[in-house]
Image (spheres, grey):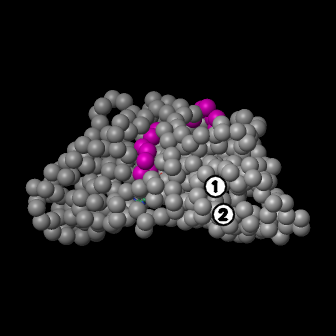
Amino acid sequence: MKILAIETSCDETSISVVEASGGLDNPAFSVLSQVISSQTEIHAPWGGVVPNLAKRAHSENIVPILFEALEKAGLSAVADNPAPVPDSILEILHRETEAQTDFADRLPTIAIPDIDMIAVTKGPGLEPALWVGINFTRALSLYWDKPLIPTNHMLGHAVSALLSDETVTFPALALLVSGGHTEILSLDNWTDIKMIGETLDDAAGEALDKGARLLGLDYPGGREISLLADQARTENLEKKFDLPRPMLHSGDLNFSFSGLKTALLYTVKKLGEISDTDKKIIAREFEEAIIEVIVKKTFSAVLETGAQTIMTGGGVIANHNLREALKIEANKNNIKIIFPPTDVSTDNATMIAMAGYFDYLKNKNGADASEDIIRAEGNLGF
Ligand code: KG4
Ligand code: ZN
């Protein structure tokens, strides 16, 4: 089946069309189109995502992105008998923005696309941002008469590793490390999912972004820290600073990164002026502290659950040092670990289409788009 999916939970507006097949026994996905518009530059001056700026950018971008995604998937045939958009649907569209007013004129110009359903992220994420995608999807679902599947963004990150064409043997774990979340999920199959570890305060990506800011680096900081850390390695710079490994021996599967960020703050304050060399050495220590804790907790979870496969996802999983450290440990433990291709490690709508397929297989029906029953859930969990 063909799934159109819409993602607006944070600072990427993304729409994909994905062909899904194989059911729960043998799920397979092929990406017909994926369009992502990143708002990094808008939020960079603030050092983090500003919800109302994100909302406005989603509203401005979502219509052109829809047309681009449909066109790339070969689904933008001209309509023969365009039906005007009814007032009830216009009312839903106008809740989010005036930027969508021209949409009412453009929407009827294309024929109803050959898709089977529309998936949208309903949480977790920034609620003002989520609402843009939700109301836009409700309007589309009603106008085209297609089922609407509300999905969980973190399920999307969990299943994105399937795009690497690897198979998953259950029980499995999903290690999700992003700007908003650090979680370990336990999966008995594609629909029985439990969260068994999470961060008690900052997410790993958030700690990297805040740490980068303390070091005077650009936002988003994860990649910047990683680049400096790599320079410290290639230049063989000697370790000079000790940062803590929070919760390493806590005996559970939870994380905490805010103390690490505070320790970094004190290190930086104590130095006053930081030389470029010290920056590299600190970046390496900071990255290693985060990696060490993530690896330790993940393999404690393997022991606890008897997992056969580890799926990984989320923006921080793009970090090659983290990937290497996880691979080494997976080899030692003789367990399979799979990674999403880098372009679907960070937020995208392809993973939302994939999550939507599993939700559809579980529930076999869509939500009622005509009623106000699909709500943004900023803290949606499992
Ligand atoms: O999953 P994502 O795109 O958005 C959220 O849902 O949060 O993750 C974004 C996070 C940011 O904190 C960013 O600094 C981090 O992923 N990130 C990285 C790398 N690329 C992105 N962290 C470490 N190394 C990277 N190469
Ligand atoms: Zn994400």
Residue 14 left/right relative to 269: right
Magenta highlight on residue 1: no
To which residue does mark 2 refer?
101
Quick check: 110 above or below 365?
A: below
Cβ atoms under marks 1 and 2 closer than 8 Å: yes
Quick check: 304 above or below 237?
A: above
The image shows residue 46 at horizontal and vertical percentages of 34, 60
Nearer-the-camera pick, 56 or 42: 56
Asked where in the image residue 49 lies, by quadrant, the reply is bottom left
Nearer-the-camera pick, 203 or 14: 14
Quick check: 309 above or below 116?
A: above
Q: Which span is picked out in magenta?
A: 178-192
The kind of secondary structure element at disc 2 is loop
Circle 2 packing at 10 Å, graded few (<14), some (14-19), many (20+), is few
Asked where in the image residue 190 lies, by quadrant, the reply is top right
Magenta highlight on residue 182: yes
The image shows residue 263 at horizontal and vertical percentages of 19, 48
